[in-house]
Image: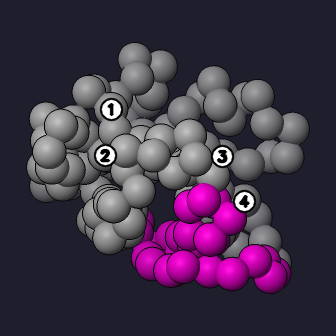
Amino acid sequence: MDTRPILWQVIDPRGLSIILAQESWEHAILHHPEIADFLPQVQLTVQDPDAIYYDPKSTESRDTGAIVYWYVKRNLLSGALEQDLLGVVVKVVIENSSKQGYVSTALPIDKPLTRLVLQWIKN
């Protein structure tokens, strides 16, 4: 069980529980300070994404057995980022024989990376 301070926990459209730990959010805004004011939008992206993509390259690079997904949503950012999509990277691990997702980072993107494989799309 994760003992780090948790900012929120939500269920994604596929039924997966996903947690954002305070430490992960601090890491995200350190590397992407432009998203510091968009914490509620990050939560909405994970809870109600437009699409979920599997990231084979990031998954293969992990020796922990974690699976990496990108959650993407449009029309959430404002100001200079208004035209960007919000991308949230989630690693999924097996804990106590069930899957648990953890937000790794979040960032504005202009489009999904070409290496990503579409896993789920909102109707």
Q: Position of residue 6 (x, y in %)?
A: 62, 80
Residue tagged by mark 4?
A: 93
Mark 2 vs mark 4, foreground winner is: 2
Between 103 and 96, the one lying in front of the other is: 103
Q: Earlier in the sequence, mark 4 or mark 1?
A: 4
* Sequence order check, earlier mark of 2 and 3: 3
**Distance (Cα) linking label 4 and label 1:** 25 Å
Q: Is residue 71 above or below residue 59?
A: below
Cα distance between the residues tagged 2 and 4: 23 Å
Kind of element beneath mark 1: strand
Q: Are marks 1 and 2 in contact (CB under 8 Å)?
A: yes
Q: Judging from the image, what secondary structure is the residue with disc 2 in?
A: strand
> Which is nearer the eye, 63 or 105?
105
Which mark's residue is nearer the viewer, 4 or 1?
Answer: 1
Residue carrying label 2: 86
Q: Which of the two labelled residues, at mark 4 and mark 3, occupies the earlier sequence position?
A: 3
Magenta range: 1-26
The 10 Å Cα crowd at callout 3, few under 14, some 14 to 19, many 20 or more, is some
Q: Residue at x 50, y 80 (%)?
A: 8
Indicate the position of residue 22 as horizontal and vertical percent values: 62, 71
Of all residues, the one furthest to the right in this rendering is 63
Q: What residue is shown with label 1?
A: 109
Pointers 4 and 3 in contact (CB under 8 A)?
A: yes
User: Which marked residue is nearer to the observer: mark 2 or mark 3?
Assistant: 2
Mark 1 residue type: Ile
What is the quadrant of residue 118 in the picture? top left
**Is 15 covered by the magenta stretch?**
yes
Give the mark toward the camera: 1 or 3.
1
Is residue 93 in sight in this rendering? yes
Sequence-earlier tag: 2 or 4:
2
